[in-house]
Image (cartoon, grey):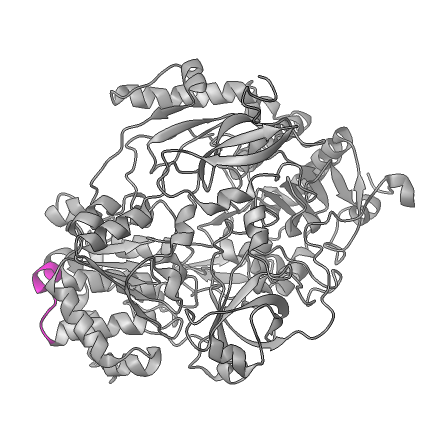
Amino acid sequence: MSEVDEAGRGVRYQHMSHWGMFEAEVSGGEVVAVHPYPGDSDPSPALGNIAGSVGNKARITGPAVRRGWLENGPGPSCARGSDEFVSVDWEELTQRLAGELRRVIDTHGNSAIFGGSYGWGSAGRFHHAQSQVHRFLNALGGYTRSVHSYSLGATGVIMPRVVGTHWKMFARSTSWKVIAEHTDLMVCFGGVPLKNTGVNHGGTSDHPTRGALDALRRRGGRIVSFSPLRDDLHGAAQWHAPVPGTDVTIMLALAYVLATEGLHDKAFLDSHCVGYDRFEEYLLGRADGVPKSPAWAQQISGIAADELVVLARRMAAGRTMVTVTWSLQRVRHGEQAPWMGVTLAAMLGQVGVPGGGFGHGYGSMNEPGLAPVPYPLPTLPQGLNPVTDFIPVAAVSDMLLNPGAPFDYDGQRLTYPDIRMLYWAGGNPFHHHQDLGRLRRALARPDTIVVHEPYWTPMARHADIVVPSTTSLERDDISCTRNDPLLVAMHAAVGPYADAQDDYDTFSALARKLGVGEKFTEGRSSQQWLEHLYEQWRGFVRADGGPAPSFDEFWTRGQVRMRTEDDLVLFGDFRADPVKYPLATPSGRIEIFSADIDSFGYDDCAGHPRWYEPEEWLGGDRAQQYPLHLIANQPRSRLHSQLDHGGTSQASKIKGREPLRIHPDDAAARGVVAGDVVRVYNDRGSCLAGAVVDDGVRRGVVQLSVGAWYDPLDPTDPESLCVHGNPNVLTPDVGSSSLSHGCTGQHVLVQIERYLEELPPIRAYDPPTITSRSARGSARWS
């Protein structure tokens, strides 16, 4: 293929990303432009981060080892994150890493390796970082794992106990087509933020949310949004701006009106639910003396009682969909909002009805509302992990700081393992995890940290052994998801950058040195694995009667369209016949009251949904010192922290800092004007951000997205000011409850002041100091 086509443009290669399908235009060995897939009705603007990403200055050019680890050997070290690195060749890196893996396993056992690797990595099915590292570690005898996700830590535990599943909430949710055609009223707790629908794990060929919401309105449907941020919903809607974190009180008040006015569906509650009577005792105040009335909710949430009464009656009068975003469960007591959302929908009696019922995740990612495919996807088998130790994913710091300590999780009493090696590939915990000062102290504890990365992310800077990985643009792969009709050939657009190589090649070399080469590779190259995975998928499709071209034909054509299950209604079969199609709960029905959860005796998660006063909210004592409620939500300019150095993300910055939105009254009270750099702080830490004055933010609330690469003013100090604007220096590292230990990074109380000192430079994307070994003598450890 020539470098330039007849029209003088760069050669184009079809590819897939988490932001959608596109063509990469290549010239001079770099992706110079990205062209969205023509079939995408609303392409994500985050595609603009891809051009120029291959050769960005933040790329890791070759294998590197932290000098202190190289010279002194494995062991705890506070120098991680500030030490210089030494350049080594691939043979030395492979030899040293294989030796360290063998030492840890032989001395401490496989449970001493934490294969965290939490992150989105690549959209490809084969070159998926988590799949690769977990397959490799399983070939060695296993590893300590994490369960659930930072996005859905509370939901992943509570929803299986309430409705028997959590993945169906998004993978088999009521379709946007059904909502647009049948819903009269959408009541959206957390809104339906379009910015989040730009992304989907594994990619997507279409973004239909905007069009579906517009179609709903054209048909006469109405939308109500409860969110402190006006733009959490696209287009015309009735906007209520509650005190952040008080949505459960609003849902309880709506339920109170339904119950006291006889608007709840008693027949549905009797036939499809268990425990409503126990919940009603609490709702009406017979259990605790506090009726959960609209007047009660108004005092906590700030939403007028008469408006809640009117809304409850309107919800009962037509086809109503109750939705709860994922953000509402990323808080202390995060189990309560989705549980209460299900309960409210059950009281309306519309669960399983076209256009009615409950949704969890609309506006949280592109997947909810899309039609699923009916057969398995091509998947790299990860093997079996014989190690039984695990942690909730958001308990990484707790695990590292408290080896051997007991902890509660989902009715179990477990123990934190003693971790000697962290093996990370394809993720950046400095984006996901809370209280970064505490995380840095935790990362000083293991003997060795290994990171596979294309870029010098904050996690790579805290590694002892840095393995330079290719990006998806530098390798062939296959992409598809469980809710998209296209199986896509991802054609490599450029060759490997500098001395980077595919993770599969790295793990293959390591596996050979450790005597498990055949077990890991099964004798296949990357290309042979692609063909093997495709043929497995092809067998399922052919059995279903669908189109299944040969691999060569597929690779040339670039895509295959699969059958999808359209017009889906969540729990439609259960509604039609709860005996024939029971839920996977102990009762087979919706558990408004869970006897199992009640039996655990947790004081922070009772047997039915209820209101718990959180520590970080504007009504608490802590607000006297830190009077602004910061919402640390997902960015509109990127996915998490991926490609923060890209064009779209960089265009959103203010004087190089992450933008912070603040209400005009709150800005004026602090002498802040648009474009100022402000210091955001509390007793955990501080960061700089660029002020955006915006009346679409509730008074007393500020919004600072996660994902700006952590950039401490003093890299040797875990408590140092982040000059770039990472809000996780502020957020509390505490689990949602004893039930799930989910992430609580969405909300935090802060104070803000203008930053009047000379602005420090942004160094987040600059590579660390990398020297040759001769610069300070030869290594003393081998």
**47 relative to 510 in the view: left or right:** left
Quadrant placement of the N terminus: top right
Instruction: Read off the magenta span.
Output: 261-270
Relative vertical location of residue 98 with respect to residue 243 in this rendering, above or below? above
Residue 22: image x %, image y %?
A: 46, 34
| x 63%, y 67%: residue | 688
Residue 280 can be seen in this image? no
The percent position of residue 259, horizontal first and vertical second, equals: 14, 73
- List x then y, in percent, for residue 423: 62, 43
Q: Which residue occupies 73% across, 36% down?
A: 63
Is residue 60 at all visible to an observer of this figure?
yes
Would residue 509 be found to the left or right of residue 364 on screen?
A: right
| Residue displayed at 60% across by 66% down | 689
Residue nearest the viewer, comparing 76 with 540: 540
Q: Quadrant of residue 184?
A: bottom left
Residue beneath the point at 70% across and 50% down: 461
Magenta span has 469? no
268 magenta-colored? yes
